[in-house]
Amino acid sequence: MRTEDAVLPRSQDIAEKGWSHGRLPVSANADWREFASAWDDLPIDPYVRPSHRTSRYRRLGRLLARGDGSVERLPTGAFVQGRDVNRVYGGQVRVFEPLLGKTHDNATFQATIAHDLDLVRQVEEKETEWVITVHAIRVIATGDAASAPAPEGRHSDGHDYVIMHLVGRENCLGGLSRLFRKGEDVPLFEHTLLAPMETLVLNDRTMEHEVTPIVPGGSSTAIRDMMIVDFERA
C-alpha cells in the first residue's frame, strides 16, 4: 500500500461512534520489510489448547507513554485479563516471549505506535499517561482445518482503547471482523481486513468485537498476521 492510499482512522469517529476504520501508509522499503518479517519469528502461544481450535504464535511488548510526550520501554511482565471479558483465557496469568529489540527499534513500528498514541490523545486528555501493550500475533490454518484468531468469540479486551493493525495475510479465506456496541445484537460494522496496515480502532469500554475463523484458500497454509495495540490509563 502506498502513502497516497492511506485513509487514516478518525478521532471524531472514535469519540462519536466508539470505533473507526482506516489504513496507515506503507512504503515497500527496508524498514517495512524488516517490520513485517518479525512475524516470521514468533514463538508458539503456549496457552492455546486443542479445544480452542486455533494455531497461534505470539510475542508481547509494553511501553509507557508519559504526558510530556516521551515513550519508554517497560518490562514485559504477565498479561492477565478478567474472566468477565475473556471466557477462554480470563483469570490466567499468561507470560509471552517479548518483542525483539530490533522490532522496537524499527522505524515502521515506532511510526505506528506514534500514530496510535496521537490518535488516542486526540480523543482523550493529551497529558494522560498510557500503558501500551503490543501483541504481535500470527494465526495459521492448514489443510481442511479452520483456525480461530479469537477463540473467545465476541468480546471486549478489558482496556480503554484497542487498535488492530493487519500486518499481512497470505492464502487466507475468512477473518471477517464484526464490531458491536455493548448490549446490542446487530453489528455496527462488518469488514475483512485485507490491505497491509488496514486498521480498526475501538473504544473498548463501549464496544465488543469478534473475527471469524480463517481457512486456506487453495494451497496448504493460510497466514494472518496482526499487531494489536492496547491502551490503558497508567
Image (cartoon, rainbow, N blue to C red):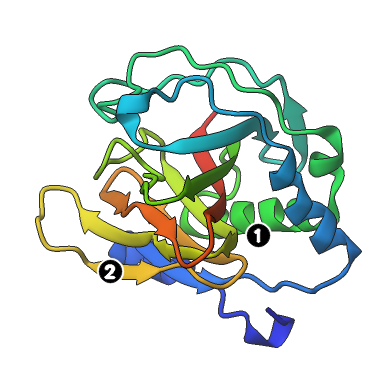
Residue on which the image places disc 2: 189
Whether residue 90 is situated above or below residue 32 in the rendered picture: above
The picture places residue 165, in percent across and down from the top left corner, at 55, 57
Residue on which the image places disc 1: 115
* The residue positioned farthest toward the right in the image shown: 30
Residue at image coords 87%, 69%: 29
Query: CA gap, disc 1 to disc 2?
Result: 23 Å
Q: Nearer the viewer, mark 1 or mark 2?
A: 2
Residue at image coords 58%, 38%: 135
In front: 95, or 19? Answer: 95
Q: Secondary structure at mark 2?
A: strand
Amino acid type assigned to the residue bearing label 1 in the image? His
The quadrant in which the C terminus is found is: top right
Q: If you read the primary sequence from the N terminus, does the residue marked by circle 1 or circle 2 appear first?
A: 1
* The residue positioned farthest toward the bottom in the image shown: 4
The picture places residue 16, in percent across and down from the top left corner, at 31, 66
In front: 22, or 71? Answer: 22
Q: Is residue 130 among the parts visible in the rendering?
A: no
Amino acid type assigned to the residue bearing label 2 in the image? Phe
Using residue 140 as the reference point, say whether residue 147 is left or right of it.
left
In front: 98, or 205? Answer: 98
Using residue 171 as the reference point, say whether residue 30 is left or right of it.
right
Whether residue 16 is situated above or below residue 208 in the rendered picture: below
Using residue 34 as the reference point, say whether residue 148 is left or right of it.
left
Residue at image coords 12%, 63%: 186
Q: Secondary structure at mark 1?
A: helix
Kindly check if marks 1 and 2 are in contact, taking CB atoms under 8 A apart as contact. no
Using residue 208 as the reference point, say whether residue 36 is left or right of it.
right
The quadrant in which the N terminus is found is: bottom right
